[in-house]
């Protein structure tokens, strides 16, 4: 087994159909740009802060199947659901993956609610996404984030004993 990780940032909640822009109003960047066309700031703002991608995952060599655990990367701040050393995460956690447009399309373990995945699939963001709600707490209030549901890998638990089914 290997443990893939990512550095991007479950319940299924309904979302409104994408609304057309009102006359004289421009569509938000995630509805008018591809992932490749986004600026660095736009790309980073797509992260909703759920931290599901920061969970330790188990990949089975014989089947390629992925199991999610409730064990978070040692750099994840369990309260804020943000990386505590984002700028240096790949030096401190060598198997941490940086997301890019190509990887987003290939990584099957990204949650169905992930904004990067949604935009890549031509879908709109959920109502609780901070870019839609204007509030970074709505991802937690909606119960989408890992806040209060995970432990740190520093606790020494075996990932095989911590497999969960709530990450989609």
Image: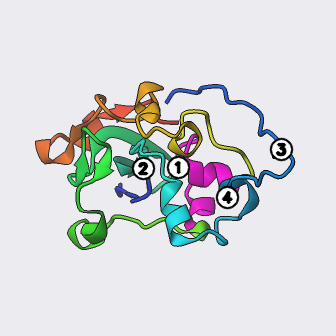
Residue at position x 87%, y 48% from top? 23
The nearer-to-camera label among 3 and 1 is 3
The local crowd at label 1, few if under 14, some if 14 to 19, many if 20 or more residues have their Cα within 10 Å, is many
Q: Report whether residue 94 is seen.
A: no
Q: Nearer the viewer, residue 23 or 130?
A: 23
Quadrant showing the N terminus: bottom left
Q: Which residue does the numbered mark 3 point to in the structure image?
A: 22
Q: Residue at x 46, y 34 (%)?
A: 139
Disc 4 designates what residue? 29
Residue nearest the observer in this picture, 97 or 42: 42
**Is mark 3 in CB contact (under 8 Å) with mark 1?**
no
Which of the two residues, 161 or 38, is positioned nearer the viewer here? Answer: 38
Tell me the mark number nearer the camera, choosing from 4 and 2: 4
Q: CA distance from mark 3 to mark 1?
A: 32 Å
- Give the Cα separation between the discs numbered 4 and 1: 21 Å
The answer to whether 63 is drawn above or below residue 151 in the figure is below
Secondary structure type for disc 4: helix
- What is the tally of numbered marks visible in this picture? 4
Question: Do residues under tags 4 and 1 come within 8 Å of each other at their CB atoms?
Answer: no
Q: CA distance from mark 4 to mark 2?
A: 23 Å
Quarter where residue 150 is shown = top left
Visible residue check, residue 84: yes
Is the residue under label 2 in contact with that under label 1 (CB below 8 Å)?
yes
Q: Which residue is mark 2?
A: 53
Distance Cα–Cα, label 2 vs label 3: 35 Å
Q: Which residues are magenta?
A: 103-120
């Amino acid at each position: 087994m290997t443990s893939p990780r990512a550095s991007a940032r479950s319940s299924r909640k309904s979302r409104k159909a994408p609304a057309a822009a009102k006359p004289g109003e421009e569509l938000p960047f995630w509805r008018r740009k591809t992932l490749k066309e986004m600026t660095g700031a736009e790309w980073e703002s797509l992260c909703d802060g759920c931290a599901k991608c920061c969970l330790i995952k188990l990949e089975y060599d014989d089947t390629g199947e992925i199991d999610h655990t409730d064990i978070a990367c040692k750099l994840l701040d369990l309260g804020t659901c943000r990386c505590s050393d984002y700028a240096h995460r790949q030096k401190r956690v060598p198997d941490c993956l940086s997301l890019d447009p190509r990887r987003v399309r290939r990584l099957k373990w990204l949650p169905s609610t992930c904004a990067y995945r949604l935009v890549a699939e031509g879908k709109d963001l959920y109502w609780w996404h901070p870019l839609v709600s204007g509030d970074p707490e709505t991802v937690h209030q909606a119960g989408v984030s890992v806040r209060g549901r995970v432990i740190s890998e520093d606790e020494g638990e075996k990932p095989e004993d911590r497999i969960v089914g709530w990450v989609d």
